[in-house]
Image (spheres, rainbow, N blue to C red):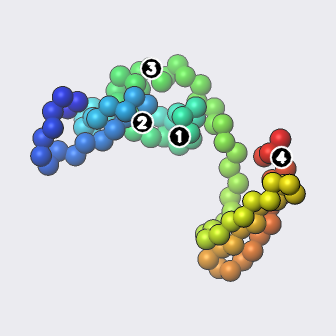
Amino acid sequence: MMDQRQLGLRQHHCRFCGRAVCDRCSTGRASIPVMGFEFDVRVCDPCLVELKDMDHTPMAVFHDAKHSVVFMSLDEARQRLLTVGQDRLIKVWDISALLE
């Protein structure tokens, strides 16, 4: 697949090495936190073998906003984040723990 360009054959890309692969050549999924992929993403089979020994501990901290955010504003000096949801709900978040 990596050497072929066939019309109608959907190409995907390995998120680790970037090579173009078909669905058969990329059966595995893995998280790659050091590259920003905290959830499982498509990787080619050779990279899946290489990634088995890698540390997959998440590097991000997740906070569930529980509303669809349409606007946000960051005040770094006060360490606050303001979010406005589609439901017109305004929330002010203390993000001091994230900025340390």
Residue at image point 20% right, 32% down: 1
All told, the count of numbered labels is: 4
User: Does residue 28 appear in this view?
Assistant: no
Which residue is label 3 attached to? 50
Q: Earlier in the sequence, mark 4 or mark 3?
A: 3
Left/right placement of residue 66 relative to residue 38 reads right
Find residue 64 and report its horizontal and vertical position in percent.
68, 58
The residue tagged 1 is: 37
Name the kind of residue labelled 3 in the image: Glu
Q: Quadrant of residue 4?
A: top left
Mark 3 touching mark 2, by CB under 8 A? no
Extreme residue toward the front, this view: 77
Q: Amino acid at mark 1?
A: Phe
Amino acid identity at mark 4? Ala
Distance from disc 1 to disc 4, alpha carbons, whole Å, reads 22 Å
Q: Are marks 2 and 1 in contact (CB under 8 Å)?
A: yes
Mark 1 surroundings: few (<14), some (14-19) or many (≥20) residues within 10 A: some
Q: Which residue is mark 4?
A: 97
Q: Give the number of the disc on residue 15.
A: 2
Task: First in sequence, mark 2 or 4: give its number.
Answer: 2
Q: Secondary structure at mark 3?
A: helix
- Label 2: few (<14), some (14–19) or many (≥20) C-alpha neighbours in 10 Å: some
Looking at the rendered image, the disc whose residue lies closer to the viewer, 3 or 2, is 2
For discs 4 and 3, the disc positioned in front in the rendered view = 4
Q: Residue at x 48, y 24 (%)?
A: 51
Q: Choose the circle earlier in sequence order: 3 or 2.
A: 2
| Labelled pair 1, 4 in contact (Cβ < 8 Å) | no
Q: Determine whether, in the image, residue 49 is placed left or right of residue 24.
A: right
